[in-house]
Image (cartoon, rainbow, N blue to C red):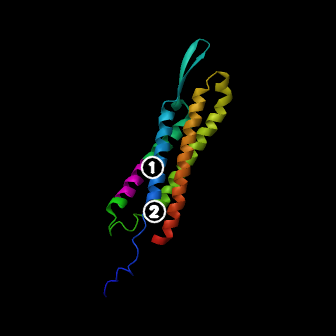
Amino acid sequence: MAPLPPSMAPPPPSMAPRMTALLLRVLTFAFLVASLAILTTDTTTLEIDGEVFKFRFKDVYSYRYMLAATVFGIAYTVLQVAFTLNHIVKRNAQTSSDGNPVFDFYGDKVVSYILATGAAAAIGATKDMKPLLTALGVNSFLNKGYASASLLLLGFVCTAMLSVLSSYALPKKV
């Protein structure tokens, strides 16, 4: 069979979906790293009846879960950024299938749910602690908890968008 003339050859695959995914993954990474930095520096000192207590993020179980969700999200995002960059750089016949769409689909779904539950747990715990800690005059601890959870929630939004994009790619490749 003779090769097609250049005018009838199919167009090269578009890099727009991969570039969009890369941008969303970089945004996810930035939000998660910022959330991690704020969370791990969330400490305060309480003075109750002359005794001084150091209150850290790891003293709150929901914040520990948020930490685990954030670290898991960072690890997954770094792995996916590496895969995406590999695909963009090589862009040859071996990688023209856009990697493993099933891994992208299920991975994005699972990670987005983990990030969402981590943010929800931290927001709920912070709201529950607010009356007690506000009475003790410790608002900065709560504000950092809210800030970290909000950034984690933004990371979830980016991952959820990636989940939708990967669901569009799945029927084309499977």
Which residue: 48% across, 39% down? 34
Please state the horizontal and vertical placement of residue 41, each as a whole percent of the image: 49, 30
- Asked whether the viewer can see residue 171, the reply is yes
Magenta highlight on residue 50? no
Q: Main secondary structure of the magenta part?
A: helix
Please name whichever residue, 56 or 149, is drawn nearer the observer in this view of the structure: 149
Residue 44 in the image: above or below residue 88: above
| Foreground: disc 1 or disc 2 | 2
Which residue: 34% across, 64% down? 91
> Total label count?
2
Q: Mark 2 sits on what residue?
A: 16
- Asked whether the viewer can see residue 174, the reply is no
Please name the amino acid that badge 1 sits on. Val
Please state the horizontal and vertical placement of residue 142, each as a whole percent of the image: 60, 30
User: On the rendered image, what quadrant is the N terminus found in?
Assistant: bottom left
Which residue: 47% across, 58% down? 20
Task: Name the secondary structure under disc 2.
Answer: helix
Quick check: 9 left or right of 55? left
Magenta highlight on residue 77? yes
Which residue: 65% across, 35% down? 127
Q: Tell me the magenta residue range.
A: 75-86
Residue 72 in the image: above or below residue 18: above
Quick check: 8 left or right of 36? left
Task: Name the secondary structure under disc 1.
Answer: helix
Residue 172 in the image: above or below residue 3: above
Q: Mark 1 sits on what residue?
A: 26
Please name whichever residue, 24 or 149, is drawn nearer the observer in this view of the structure: 24
Please state the horizontal and vertical placement of residue 121, each as a whole percent of the image: 59, 41
